[in-house]
Image (spheres, rainbow, N blue to C red):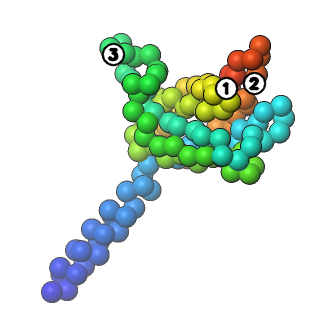
Amino acid sequence: MRWIALVSLVLSIFLAASNAFAGRIFGDIKLDGKPVPAGIVLKIALAPPAGAPGAEPGPAAIVVDSTVTDNFGSYKLTVKEEGKCILTLVYEKQTPTLEVFSYKDPTRYDLILEKKDGTLSLRRK
């Protein structure tokens, strides 16, 4: 009986900690030197393998996590697989994207949202 309880406990711990092995991507986003407003939508999708059909990032990419910015322009996303990802920001009916990489350790991406000729672009600080 104790053996079953112990195995159940260990199994529960491993299943609950599955996100501990996922890569976290986090950071701040600024526009004109100030944090972006709260509620800006961010999505992250795994990039298709190079040379694969439909290798261009776009609506066909499967979103693995999404979030919104807080009052300080901060965000946190979790990606369970390591590798290249496409980060998409939705702001003023535009969707600038940026290639980022997910690792097993948390990775900080502080971003700059720039507006040139009415078009938004996203780059790393």
**Separation (CA) of disc 3 from disc 2:** 31 Å
The residue nearer to you, when weighing 111 against 5, is: 111
The residue nearer to you, when weighing 13 against 69, is: 69
Q: Position of residue 12 (x, y in %)?
A: 31, 69
Which residue is denoted by mark 3 in the rendering?
52
Residue 75 appears in the rendering:
yes
Q: Which quadrant of the view contains residue 15?
A: bottom left
- Residue lying at the far left of the rendered structure: 1
Confirm or deny contact between disc 1 and disc 2 (CB under 8 A): yes
Which residue is depicted at the point 39% across and 25% down?
60
Q: What element carries label 3?
A: loop
Q: Earlier in the sequence, mark 3 or mark 1?
A: 3
Q: Where is residue 53 in the image (x, y as percent from the top left)?
A: 32, 14
The residue nearer to you, when weighing 1 against 56, is: 56
Q: Is residue 8 above or below residue 63?
A: below
Identify the amino acid type marked 3.
Ala
Q: Is residue 53 above or below residue 70?
A: above
Which residue is depicted at the point 45% across and 33% down?
45
Residue 122 got which mark?
A: 1
**Separation (CA) of disc 1 from disc 2:** 6 Å
Which residue is depicted at the point 44% across and 48% down?
22
